[in-house]
Amino acid sequence: MNNEEDVATADPSDMNDIDLEGDGPDASQLPSVEEVRTNQSLAPDANETKRRRKKCRVWSAIFLAAVLVALVIGISVAVSKSKSRSGGTAQSAAPPAPVPSPTASAPAPTQPAPTPVPEMTDAEREKAARAFLMTTGVSLEDDMNLSGSPQHKALKWISKEDTRRVPIPSNPEDLGTTKARKFVQRYALATFYYATEGDSWFYPFSFLSDKDECEWYEIHTEGEEVYFWGAHCEGGSDEGAVSQIWLPNNDMAGTIPQELEQFTNLRVFALEYNLNITGTLPDAFHSMSDLSVIVLSNNLIEGKIPSSFKKLSNLEFLAADDNQMEGNLNHIKELDTLKYVYLEDNFFTESLSDSTFDGWTKLKQLDLSDNEFSGTVPASLLNHEHLTVLDLHDNDLTGPIPEVSDKQDRLTYLALHKNSLSGPIPSTIKHLQGLTDLDLSHNQLTGDIQESLKHLNLVYLFLGENKFDANPVPAFLTGMTNLTELSLKHTNLHGSIPDSFGDLTDLYLLDLDKNKLTGTIPESLGNLDNLIVLMLNRNRLTGTVPE
């Protein structure tokens, strides 16, 4: 069974992001409010500076006016005296004395222009980037030096090929700054691109473009739902940190790199249906306390659940189904935030018991089918406070089906088929009053087909391939008129097919194969207009098939 949620909806800032619940900041950062306030507190008051300059200009103007007035008066007196001596004749007048220019105030000293920092060459950028990434532990030196590795390619790209030319931090102590974070997450996304064979992706989502890395996504809509596919940030491009990586069904291959650990603000990590992502999951989840959604379904991922999953204190949705993973559930047992767990179609091994799931108190859906789990069906799951879907089929479970202690209407889907369960169906199964789908086929169940099933509003009932006692077809089944699929294959039935089966008008599948039924096929079955699959082979029936 492959159940998928929401993964993800319009706003990745919460579980509505995918309706699964995202966060983060964005790109090249302006000074924060606190930095501006701090800088202003260290500088002189701007208004005070203006007042001082204005006052200086006023006094300078007064001084210059006084000098000019004095010069004019002096010149007038000199001309008057000269005229009186010469009798007023212009011919004898002495040439006027040159007027001295007023003394200009000295210009304020100017600060020398800062020497521009020369642009680093590509080689210098690569050297600086390598040193920073190595000393801060973002990437291993050997990985960056290995020609053709994702880290080597990402280093070359961000140093030489990236036309955005993002600043490269020079001091390892800058690692927590916006400048360093923007550089690191751009490099880490480039590493992720190369590690998953980005050149072969079905859609590039603007990866490795000259856009800010917080804009490496496309908007996808389905009805009223809006999804961000690609790498998405919260907080805008200037200050944002990657909060979502969602690349479904994109022909990705390769492996998931260790550099994933740099996305400490990640809320959603989803790579479902890429089919060819291989290798093991990196142990890179230690600092992702905001991560709430992981979807890795339908790939070729191997190995165990990483130990760093223990640190995912807000994880609600985990889907790693249809891979090749193994090991046990130890690293996720204590995650009390888990609500949806899909690990079917892998090779997990563990002996299940009630204590296995003690920590999952908020669990709503659990699918561990098609693995190699042993032990018994935990009674705690059938009596769980919130569980709606439980699928444990195709494992190695033994023992009886546990009793259901109290009436509850939460569990709607129960699949325990293809195990080695034994004993009778408990009569307390009637307490699962919300159950619509029940599959107990392919076990070793004994006794009668439990009549208390008639109290359930079942749509799907499969009981075939068990060792029930020899009995006629149970009459109570004909009263379960909501049934659309009914299989009693190889359940040791004998006698005739009840004519009242014609009342099950919603049936589109009826399987009575491999029993010891006799007589004719009731004409009433010809009235089942919705019937598509009818299996009556390997019986002792006679007559004709009704039209």
Image (cartoon, grey):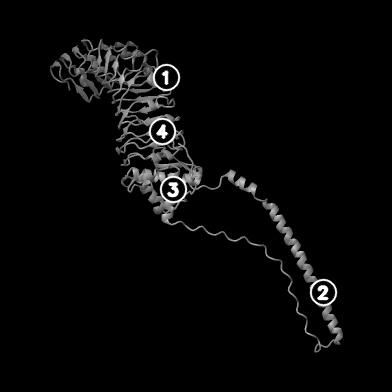
The mark nearer the N terminus, 2 or 1, is 2
Q: Which residue is mark 2?
A: 73
Image coordinates for residue 123, horizontal then vertical, percent: 41, 55
The mark nearer the N terminus, 3 or 1, is 3
- Asked whether 222 or 144 is in front, the reply is 144
Q: Nearer the viewer, mark 2 or mark 3?
A: 3
Label 2 element class: helix
Type of amino acid under label 2: Ile
Alpha carbon separation for disc pair 4 and 2: 90 Å
Alpha carbon separation for disc pair 3 and 1: 53 Å
Q: Which residue is mark 4?
A: 293
The mark nearer the N terminus, 2 or 3, is 2
Q: Which residue is mark 3?
A: 131
Residue under the point 42% across and 19% down:
385
Q: State the residue lying farthest toward the left.
A: 543
- Asked whether 504 or 447 is in front, the reply is 447
